[in-house]
Image (cartoon, coloured by chain):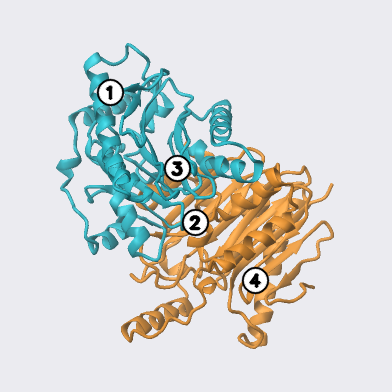
Chain colours: A cyan, B orange
Amino acid sequence: MSFSLVVHGGAGTMKPGTMTPEMEASHHRGLRVVLRAGYAVLAAGGSALDAVTAAVMALEDDPQFNAGRGAVFTSGGRQEMDAAVMDGASHAAGAVAGIIGPRNPVMAARAVMESSEHVLLMGEGALAFLREQNLAWEEPGYFFTESRWKALQTELDRRRLSAEDTRDAAAKHGTVGAAARDANGHVAAATSTGGMTGKAPGRVGDCPVFGAGTWADDATCAISCTGHGEFFIRWGAAHEISARMRLGGQSLEQAAEAVMAELGERGGNGGLIAVDAAGNVSMPFNSAGMYRGRIGPDGVPWTGIYREALRGE
Amino acid sequence: MSFSLVVHGGAGTMKPGTMTPEMEASHHRGLRVVLRAGYAVLAAGGSALDAVTAAVMALEDDPQFNAGRGAVFTSGGRQEMDAAVMDGASHAAGAVAGIIGPRNPVMAARAVMESSEHVLLMGEGALAFLREQNLAWEEPGYFFTESRWKALQTELDRRRLSAEDTRDAAAKHGTVGAAARDANGHVAAATSTGGMTGKAPGRVGDCPVFGAGTWADDATCAISCTGHGEFFIRWGAAHEISARMRLGGQSLEQAAEAVMAELGERGGNGGLIAVDAAGNVSMPFNSAGMYRGRIGPDGVPWTGIYREALRGE
């Protein structure tokens, strides 16, 4: 009886020295809270599906990460959130795109999966469906954070001045996600995002595109991606890793690292987390850093930010 | 120098005897117009990308097919169209979801691919971008057809009476699409749909989900799917076929027929058209019928509706 959980809070240009020690410590702390939320489910014999949901809810609740509370703003000054969840046992899947309202977008994605006959609902139509579900809702003020609002103003100023966009592609596309393997050998994945600061309203990234940013299959693995989503879509990143394991006989690590490296060669910046059906984990990224962590049956959370060994608490 | 084009106008319960001879003839005629539109591009040395765009435009312009003019209505009495296009040479891709306005949704998808930094735009945000592009627009009246409106009223009446939904899953999810291989060996695919009659507003099917309903890769094939899109998403149908060819050494026909058969075993109704990099075509479906056709260098259009040999003109 073994289980395994991996999480990410986005990839980008987090080189050592670009964050204060306090900020670093705060992100490690946040990731540990997230890992323990998922661990509590798995240690109690819960499902991978419930564990990734709990972990992503914790990531959404922490304004340090770009999903739920703390989501970034579109160029129109709004917040538009996407979320997705997939169960590797049944291939059941649910996703929402371009919504604001439900406190936890990943719970909205689960409602689509469990209570609709559809897989993907977007915008106002999605909200109309979600209002009939038993979800916690919040006013726009709940999701607002001063730092994300300032980031939008900085970006809009840059555009007015036609200055060069020096933002890192992966950092612009922050996402959170989780992948888990439970004690029964089932896997699941979930991803949630506020998108990119100053994005065009209506832009949908790889998060709700199953096979690109989110995938789960008990026969292979569960995956959640973060980064420049357009590249993950155009190369079917998550499904490709699963296919290389199933059809090409590769290990999770071989497939995940190769696909991430190839995306990098093509200009796609970012990373991913994955767990296979045996509980092995892989967390490759081609950006400077990726907020990430893993936890297993011993309950010790291991977290990392830069290209460094994970640190246990 | 060989080229090849395949098209579909949706799959469903079109058993012999369910359509009048006039309706049958009219659909064959419509498919021939579509095939000749794509053939004109390919015979002039044009690209697969331009050929699938031309073919899908012709399908959208023909109100017999559920895309563009003749799109079905949501339960809210509106029309919401999705379209996608993908170039196998570069993996460039563009899609729109939940729009009404551009005369040809496939041209809107191409504008996203060619003039935005994004791959998928939805709803009002998509329309705001598209208004800046050089596209032909139409008033809602252009897209309206009496038969689709009546179909919605019938469906709403059924729901009021809580009567059984006897509609075929594939027929409910009509789609059009094209896949082509040009004389230079490049492939491309495009898909367009009005969705399903009485669908929940905001529902997005497999059409704009790359890897599910639409995929193109010069290394393997180009594919456009039609049917119960949720199943195609949950099993990554189009990318799976490509992966089985590339990683599993299967032929297009082997991979396409096996994936369609497996979808059927899981309850997924529909079909797909595909062309490989050598110009071979495959058109499997697990529903009673699928509007479909192919054309090659001799310029003779071959079309079919039921489980039958295609007929040349």
Residue A309 position within the rendered picture, expressed as x and y whole percent measured from the top left: 41, 19
Looking at the image, which is closer to me, B255 or B49?
A: B255
Q: Which mark is residue B291?
A: 4
Horizontal and vertical percent position of residue B104: 53, 57
Q: Secondary structure at mark 3?
A: loop
- The label shown at residue A313 is 1
**Contact, mark 2 vs mark 1 (Cβ under 8 Å):** no
Amino acid at pointer 2: Arg
Identify the amino acid type marked 4: Tyr
Could you tell me the amino acid type at mark 1? Glu
> Which image quadrant is residue B21 in?
bottom right
Q: Evaluate whether label 2 is on the same chain as label 3.
A: no
Q: Nearer the viewer, mark 2 or mark 1?
A: 1
Left or right: residue A5 compared with residue B103 = left
Question: What secondary structure is marked by label 4?
Answer: strand
Q: Please identify, in this view, whether the residue under mark 2 or under mark 3 is nearer the observer.
A: 2
Name which of mark 1 and mark 3 comes first in the sequence.
3
Crowd tier of the residue under label 3, counting other residues whose Cα lies within 10 Å: few below 14, some 14–19, many 20 or above:
many
Residues behind callouts 3 and 4 on a single chain: no
Q: Residue at x 44, y 72 (%)?
A: B197
Figure quadrant of residue A305: top left
